[in-house]
Amino acid sequence: MAKAEDVKEILDPRREFTLESPDNEINHYFIANPSGEDIRKSDWQYSKIYNQAIVDGFLTQAQMIGVLKDKGILDDEYTDKLESVRTSLAAELFKLENLLDEADESDREASALEVAGLRDELFQMNQMVNGPMGNTCENLAEDARTEYLTSRIIQTKDGENLWDEYDNYRSEENTALCVKSRFEVMLWMQGLGSDFLENTPEQKVLRGIAQSRLDRALEAAEAEAADAPAENAKVEEIPLEVPAEKATKPKAKKRGRPKGTAKKKTVKKTAAKKED
């Protein structure tokens, strides 16, 4: 039986993404396939910006790599460490993906955290190079091509283009919408989903472990709540008010000889002897 999302995909093949407005309203946007004219004009935009960057004195990728080597950023030590981290990440990923579901939870968590740490280390090392490389002629031109395509293929739900012209996109006051749209188009061009970072093997394992722990905690709380009434039923309630009959009942009289009686009798006998 076809699922609802499968039917939706057939009826609307466009890729959807959302953006929350300052008023906490969720807006839906769609990425449509570009036309032939859109692709040709985006390539022309690439060539124009590339040539302009050359004229303005920006370095090409080959020239930037040479500068990074001269500065000691891209040296043998960096290359060896980068390869070591990549190899370790591949090995840990293989280990994680081959762990059985019956494996100890702590082992799966430790393996997932190791993969996450290595992936973050690889990202940080790549950023040392990606930062400078982002200002090369090729990268500036590629950004311009992506921006042009973004202005042409982002649509509303009814299929209308969000921006009529490229200049409208460039003058858009909603910066968050421009950045989000370009990011989604960039991922779409690379064949990546919007949530690709959340669906890595290590994140799936960590999310599953967290859910299992939450389920166990909820079950324990429900069991404790179910046992609580039975225990409370055994406790006899203590009245807070004294019953009326106990409050009005007179005090019992004390038995025995009143105080001072024996002393009075002794005094009377002594007085009688003196008279005799």
Image: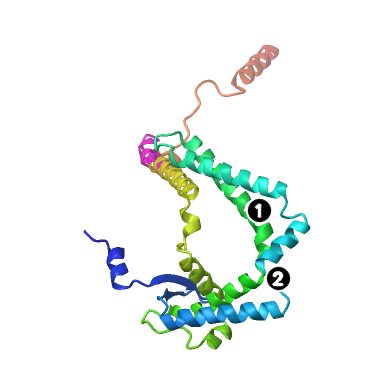
In x, y percent, where is residue 52?
A: 66, 81
> Spatial distance from mark 2 to mark 1, Cα to Cα?
21 Å
Where does label 2 land, which residue? 59
User: Disc 2 or 1, which lies upstream in sequence?
Assistant: 2
Q: Are marks 2 and 1 in contact (CB under 8 Å)?
A: no
Residue 182 placement, left or right of 270: left
Name the one closer to the observer, 228 or 175. Answer: 175
State whether residue 186 is above or below residue 147: above
Give the main secondary structure of the magenta stretch: helix
Decide whether residue 234 is among the magenta residues: yes
State whether residue 7 is above or below residue 245: below
Name the one closer to the observer, 120 or 272. Answer: 120
Where does label 1 land, which residue? 125
Q: Which residues are magenta?
A: 223-235
Q: Residues within 10 Å of mark 2 (few under 14, many from 20)?
A: some
- The N terminus sits in image quarter: bottom left
Residue drawn at (54%, 81%), measured in percent from left and top? 44
Residue 141 visible in rendering: yes
Amino acid at the residue labelled 1:
Met
